[in-house]
Image (cartoon, rainbow, N blue to C red):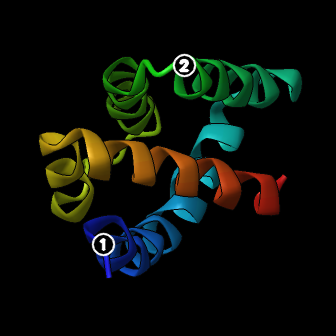
Amino acid sequence: MDNNNAILPTVELISGAYSSRLWDNLCDICEIEESSAHIYTALEALHETGRNQEAFSLIRALYDLAGLDLPDDVAVLDRSDETCKAYIAELLLDIEDII
C-alpha cells in the first residue's frame, strides 16, 4: 500500500468531522447566498492549479471568518504537500455534499 492510500481514510475522517460546521458558519455570515459558491470556486481553482498551500491559507482565513478555531487535526495537514492536497480534495467533496 502506498503512503497516499494509508493517509486517505484519516484525511477523509478529519474533513468530515469539521467541514459541516465550517460551512454552516460561513453560510450564516454570508449575506448573499452566492458568496458561498464563490468561496467554493476559489478553493477549487487553487486546488486544480496545484496551489494547495494558497488554498490552505484560504481555509485558515475561512475558519477565522467563521469565528472558529482551526482544529489541531486540520492544522497539521499542511505540513506535507501530500496531506494538504488530500485534505483540500476531501474538503471540496464534503462541501459538494453540503451544497
Mark 2 Cα-neighbour bin, 10 Å: few <14, some 14–19, many ≥20: some
Rendered residue at 14%/53% (across/down): 76
User: Residue under circle 1?
Assistant: 2
Residue 57 appears left or right of 20:
left
User: Residue under circle 2?
Assistant: 46
Residue 81 appears left or right of 59:
left
Residue 10 appears left or right of 55:
left
The x, y position of residue 36, in whole percent, is: 75, 30
The local secondary structure at tag 2 comes to helix
The local secondary structure at tag 1 comes to loop
Mark 1 Cα-neighbour bin, 10 Å: few <14, some 14–19, many ≥20: few
The x, y position of residue 75, in whole percent, is: 19, 49
The x, y position of residue 85, in whole percent, is: 40, 43
Which three-letter amino acid code belongs to the residue tagged 2? Answer: Leu
Q: Which mark is residue 72?
A: none
Question: Where on the picture, by quarter, is residue 72?
Answer: bottom left
